[in-house]
Every structure is written in C-alpha cells, then in structure tokens.
Amino acid sequence: MTRKAQSFEDIPRMADEVAQLMASRFGGAPRGERPPLHLMLDRRGGALPLRLRAGAARLAKAGRLSAQPKVARQLPLRRLSRDHAALVAHLRPLGALSRWQGRAVSIAAALALGLLVLAGIALWIAVKRGLI
C-alpha cells in the first residue's frame, strides 16, 4: 500500500504494514505474532536510520491516535504518507529470499574460514613433528 492516505482510516493499515516489514527484515517478533508499530520501534527501532526513525515514530503515534476519530481527522495525512513511503522504500528492497541467501552465504563463509584455520593448524603440527 504505497498510495497516499485518503483518510484517517488508512493510517492503521500503513502503520501495520511498516511494522510487518520491520519484523520481517530486523526480527523482533515471535513467530505468528504481529506487534504494533510502536512496539516494533521499541524492539528494533535502533536498526532504522535516524531520519527514518523520526518518521516511524510519527506514524506509530498517528496509528495509536487514529482510534479516536475526532483526533484522527486532525492528523497530517500528507506528511504521514511521505513517512510511510520512505519507510516502505527502505524496508522493502531486500526480500525474504535474498535475506535467506545472505544468511546462507554468511554461514558458508564462516565454515570455510573455520576449515582453513583448521587445515593451517594441522599443517603447522605436521611440520613441527617432522611429518612434512
């Protein structure tokens, strides 16, 4: 939902979308749980760049205030739409598949380094004992 907010009723959907993207990218949500944006900011808000953290805080506050229609009608929809678009653009580029591939490559690199160090130690021991 990267369109602009038409009314205050769109604000909770925008906040939920950003919270889901944060949970999928940074973790911090147990499996099956969909925490609200303000809770995700408490858990993993430090992983966001500073300029986006302020927008996420505004969106989280607006998400809580949107439950009160009189207050929600006074919220700046244009600014919240810009904040939502910036957060989605930052959080969405890496999909779940590429994150999984990144983790797999990282694990493989760690294993390769471990085997290389182990081979080096074995070679050093063989040289010290006069086997080579």
Image (spheres, rainbow, N blue to C red):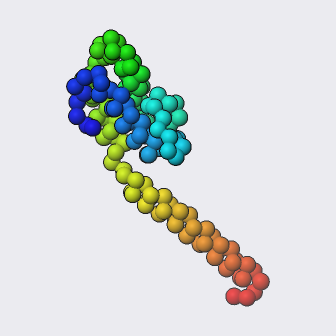
In the foreground, 47 or 72: 72
Q: Is residue 6 left or right of residue 130?
A: left
Q: Is residue 106 left or right of residue 20?
A: right
Q: In the current view of this chain or complex, which residue is farthest to the top?
A: 70
Q: Position of residue 110 (x, y in %)?
A: 56, 64
In the foreground, 114 or 47: 47
Q: Is residue 21 left or right of residue 4?
A: right
Q: Position of residue 92 (x, y in %)?
A: 34, 45
Query: Which quadrant of the view contains residue 102?
Result: bottom left
Q: Is residue 14 visible?
A: yes
Q: Quadrant of the N terminus?
A: top left
At 25% across and 27% down in the image, what residue appears?
5
At 28% across and 34% down in the image, what residue appears?
85
Q: Quadrant of the C terminus?
A: bottom right
Q: Is residue 110 above or below residue 96?
A: below
Query: Which quadrant of the view contains residue 65?
Result: top left
Q: Position of residue 68 (x, y in %)?
A: 37, 15
At 68% across and 74% down in the image, what residue appears?
121
Q: Is residue 130 left or right of residue 115?
A: right
Q: Position of residue 126 (x, y in %)?
A: 72, 82
Q: In the current view of this chain or complex, which residue is farthest to the right?
A: 129
Q: Is residue 54 visible?
A: no
